[in-house]
Image (tube, grey):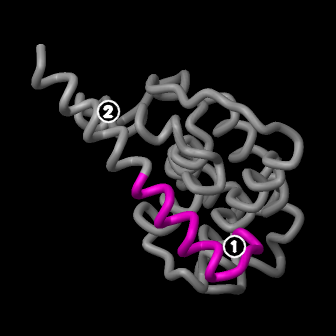
Amino acid sequence: MSSDPDFAAFAAERADALLRYGYVLSGNPHDAADLTQEALARLHGAWPRVRRKDDPEAYVRVVMARLHISVWRRRRRESLAVDPPDGAWEDQRPSDREQGLWRALAVLPRKQRAVLVLRYYEDLTDAEIARVLGIARGTVRSHASHGLARLRTVIGDTATDRSRR
């Protein structure tokens, strides 16, 4: 893709981690691959400027989050898959508990899920999430609150169903 060996090395080294991040954002292996590919293509165009910064991966993750959000305007419904993306993975398959969390996340609207992923997976502050998603900090807190409440309901329902078996 690039004659710049630094970009090629970065892309080769971080592609799997970025693909996993895309999967966490989108919940779909194909969308994750598309997000990763598009973000790396955009990074390639900005590489001379971005490589001088401390963390090019942060730039790519912001691009991925923004690309994911732009999909909200084009499609309103999606399905969150539990199966990992196609291809070889070094990570272990999620435990039953983690898979239950994936299923619970599937019921959340995209914006609530994105806020929770950025808060708990990326460990971003409300202000950082607001900047990445292009929404107000109050909206971030609202999405987080509603998303967590819904997760507690879904996970509680699932735990109750299992205890009855």
Residue 11 found in image quarter = bottom right
Image quarter of the C terminus: top left
Image location (x, y in percent) of residue 82? 44, 26
Please, what is the three-letter code of the amino acid marked with disc 2? Gly
Disc 1 crowd, CA 10 A, few/some/many (<14, 14-19, 20+):
some
Image location (x, y in percent) of residue 64? 70, 57
Residue 58 found in image quarter = bottom right
Q: Main secondary structure of the magenta part?
A: helix
Disc 2 crowd, CA 10 A, few/some/many (<14, 14-19, 20+):
some
Image location (x, y in percent) of residue 92? 29, 33
Please, what is the three-letter code of the amino acid marked with disc 1? Val
Q: Earlier in the sequence, mark 2 or mark 1?
A: 2
Which residue corresponds to the image point at 66% horizontal and 78% vertical from the top-left? Answer: 130
Q: Is residue 114 left or right of residue 165?
A: right
Whether label 2 touches label 1, CB < 8 Å: no
Number of labels in the image equals 2
Which residue corresponds to the image point at 72% horizontal and 45% vertical from the top-left? Answer: 35
Helix, strand or loop status at disc 1: helix
In the image, residue 103 above or below residue 10: above
In the image, residue 92 above or below residue 70: above
Q: Is residue 36 magenta?
A: no
Image location (x, y in percent) of residue 131? 70, 80
The one nearer the camera, 73 or 123, is: 73
Which residue corresponds to the image point at 23% horizontal and 28% vertical from the top-left? Answer: 96
- Quickly name the residue at label 1: 132
For marks 2 and 1, give the one nearer the viewer: 2
- Quickly name the residue at label 2: 100
Q: Is residue 98 left or right of residue 5?
A: left
Q: Which residues are magenta?
A: 132-149
Which residue corresponds to the image point at 41% horizontal and 64% vertical from the top-left? Answer: 120
Cα distance between the residues tagged 2 and 1: 27 Å
